[in-house]
Amino acid sequence: MKSALRSTFALTVMFLLGQFTLNAQNEALAGGNFAIGTGFGYVNSVTSIQIDNGGTVLKGGNTGYQLHITPTIGYFITNNFVFGLGMDYLVSSTQDNTQTTAGTQRTSDTKLLFGPYTRLYFPFAGDQALFLGAVYGYGKSDTELSIGAERQNANTTLMTFGAGPGYSIFSNGRVSLETQVKYNYGISRNIISVGGANQTTRTLTTAWDFVIGMHFYFNRR
C-alpha cells in the first residue's frame, strides 16, 4: 500500500513538472529560431588616493568610464539553448589626477572585439525567463596616451571572457527586454616606443558589468 502511494505521488510530481515545463515553454526560445539583438552597458569609476609622509599630504586618484554596445546574432540549436556570434564595441577613458604625476595623464581607448556567445534559458510564467550567458571576444584596440603636451599611440591585442546571469521578459513571443550582470576577465598586450626603445606591457583586468538590451526572435518560416 505504501509502495503504491509512493508511486502515485512520484507520478503526480512528474506530471506537474511536465505541465509546468510545457506551460513555461516560450515560443521565442524554440529550437530552430534565430535571435538578433543588442545590449548597452556603462561603468563609471572614481578612485581617491591620499599619501601622508609625515610632513606633506598629497591627494590624488583617477576617474574613468567605459561604455559598450554589443550586437549579436544567434541560432537556437535546441529549445532554450542559443549559440551565435557577437561583436563588442567599447569606448573608455581614464584620467590620473595624482599630484605626484607630472601633468595630467589621460588614457583613451576604443576596442572592437568579435567572438562566440552562448545562452541557456530557464523559462517560467509563460513570458519570462532566467538565463546564464557567456561570451568570448578577441580583437585589437587603438590607444592614445596624453602626458602634458606629449602624445603617443599604441596598438593593443586583447582577449576577454564574460559570464553571468540575466533576466528576460517577452512580448508576443517575438521581442524581449533583458538585463544581465556579467563578470568580465580580460588580458591585453601592447608595444609602445618609449625614449627610442620598445616597451611591452601586459595588463589583466577584472570587472563587473551591468547590461540592458533587447532581442528579436524569428523562426525559419
Image (tube, grey):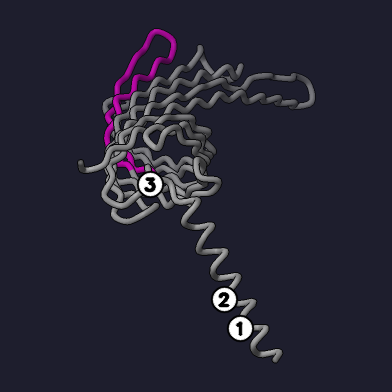
Cα–Cα gap, marks 2 and 1: 6 Å
Tell me if residue 182 can be seen.
Answer: no
Looking at the rendered structure, the number of numbered marks drawn on it comes to 3
Which amino acid, by three-letter code, is at mark 1? Ser
Check if residue 134 falls in the magenta segment: no
State the quadrant of the N terminus. Answer: bottom right
Magenta extent: 137-161
Q: Label 1 near label 2: C-beta < 8 Å?
A: yes
159 vs 104, left or right, is left
Percent position of residue 114, x then y: 27, 38
Q: Would you call the spot at circle 1 few (<14 residues within 10 Å), some (14-19), or many (20 or more)?
A: few
Q: Residue at x 60, y 70 (%)?
A: 13
Cα–Cα gap, marks 1 and 3: 33 Å
Q: In the rendered image, which residue does mark 2 sit on?
A: 11
Assign a secondary structure to mark 3: helix
Which amino acid, by three-letter code, is at mark 3? Leu
Q: Residue at x 64, y 19 (%)?
A: 60
Q: In the rendered image, which residue does mark 3 sit on?
A: 29
Q: Residue at x 57, y 22 (%)?
A: 62
Q: Would you call the spot at circle 2 few (<14 residues within 10 Å), some (14-19), or many (20 or more)?
A: few
The first of marks 2 and 3 along the sequence is 2
Q: Nearer the viewer, residue 123 or 65?
A: 123
Q: Residue at x 50, y 13 (%)?
A: 104
State the quadrant of the C terminus. Answer: top left
Mark identifier at residue 7: 1
Q: Label 3 near label 2: C-beta < 8 Å?
A: no
